[in-house]
Image: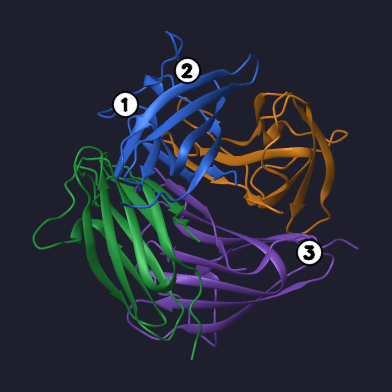
Chain colours: A orange, B purple, C blue, D green
Amino acid sequence: MSAATGEKLWIIPDGYIPEFSSGSLTSHESICVLNTSSEDASLSITIFFEDRDPLEDITEVVQGRRTKHIRTALLDKEGASIPVGVPYAIQVKSNIPIIVQYSRLDATQAENALMSIMAYPIK
Amino acid sequence: MSAATGEKLWIIPDGYIPEFSSGSLTSHESICVLNTSSEDASLSITIFFEDRDPLEDITEVVQGRRTKHIRTALLDKEGASIPVGVPYAIQVKSNIPIIVQYSRLDATQAENALMSIMAYPIK
Amino acid sequence: MSAATGEKLWIIPDGYIPEFSSGSLTSHESICVLNTSSEDASLSITIFFEDRDPLEDITEVVQGRRTKHIRTALLDKEGASIPVGVPYAIQVKSNIPIIVQYSRLDATQAENALMSIMAYPIK
Amino acid sequence: MSAATGEKLWIIPDGYIPEFSSGSLTSHESICVLNTSSEDASLSITIFFEDRDPLEDITEVVQGRRTKHIRTALLDKEGASIPVGVPYAIQVKSNIPIIVQYSRLDATQAENALMSIMAYPIK
């Protein structure tokens, strides 16, 4: 059995799905999760906006001893998803400790821009 | 009622508003705040410079259960704002716990560059 | 004698070796380690994937009072290495405290994109 | 009197001064320091290499209630400075608490790449 490491609650204040892509790659964001435990991790993701109520409890599973790089554009809650071109923020809650990083590839221009942060752990 | 998470004091040492833009996007920086509480958060922002006294107590409000991505170029204190092309630093103080991230898009060249950090929390 | 600083266990959830390079630089990732101690640090690196078992216990040594910027593409465990174009995650374990940063240069396009994070320390 | 905030010891494992520049900007790195105290901060910077002894005790001063964005290429210790195109690591020690961020602009290609991290605080 392998132990879980990290925290159960992580915050990413700067979410944004670029509207356009050009060149050979597509603009996208990923929530990158590592689950070092032998057990599966059950995630509940909440999306906060600037001008409307949050989209709550989008669920994901990260298998034991696996990583999962989750595309934010594919997150879906009963048909509702994150609109492109809109500032938002992300909260990731897990039933067991995990580690969360966030990365964005902006391919608005043919040449790409990359950014990445470790999400902020709430202890 | 939802609980506040994070910290009340955050620091960003590397602030810089690029002087020029080219291509389809405009150079800009954002202070990205998440307020997970049901209550509004009242922010007091201080700007530190290399060669002059700080610009103190610029106020902003982030509503409850909302995110706000604040453009630094729009910060205003009785007509005084942050000059472009000058190195500076940012302190964000809040009356309740929040989470703060800082991102910069540099579009000096037609193809863009991106950087982002989680601000440093003072506990 | 100089003291060791940092932590013994570090996590990087978003690993990815770009498939292509163009222009004058080559796409690559580095695990950047600082060992402030006079003693050598013995590292054991584990690579986690999305759909298969981890590649465990790849060993590296960082000499005392030295930094080492380790290219992930050169990590090797009895002939097995990290495939390109596949999402993965990294765990770095050390026998003494060290500090770990992760950086990626993506030269898929002729103009480059850079990202960097401090790895997440497990205390 | 304003209080000092942050920590007295900060680490940046991934230092690198790009060898080349093209386009309208010059490749460079900055160690960005904020001193929130009314008192001046005296810094002692150590540079660690992969294959030789560290360059120790390069001194800098950051005035009270000021930020300073220090170009690494200008650091100088009795005529010795950091060579370009060589991986290195940075330790920043201060006599009072400060906050340290590190940013790199890579203008090897005409279009720029940016990366930034909060340095790792040793408590």
Residue B72 in the image, given as x and y percentages of width and height: 52, 68
Which residue carries the number 3 mark?
A: B4
Give the secondary structure at mark 1.
loop
Residue D16 in the image, given as x and y percentages of width and height: 28, 45
**Which chain does the residue under circle 3 lie in?**
B
Q: Which mark is residue C26?
A: 1
- Asked if badge 3 and badge 2 are on a common chain, one would say no
Q: Residues within 10 Å of mark 2 (few under 14, many from 20)?
A: many
Residue D39 in the image, given as x and y percentages of width and height: 39, 85
Give the secondary structure at mark 3.
loop
Q: Quadrant of residue B3?
A: bottom right
Q: Give A86 or B35, whichever is nearer the viewer.
A: B35
Question: Looking at the image, can residue B94 be seen?
Answer: yes
Q: Quadrant of residue C111?
A: top left
Left or right of A19: which side holds C15?
A: left
Q: Please tell me whether mark 1 or mark 3 is closer to you in this view.
A: 3
Q: Amino acid at mark 3?
A: Ala
Considering the image in quadrants, where does the N terminus of chain B appear? bottom right
Which residue carries the number 2 mark?
A: C82
In this view, which residue lies farthest toward the bottom?
Answer: D1
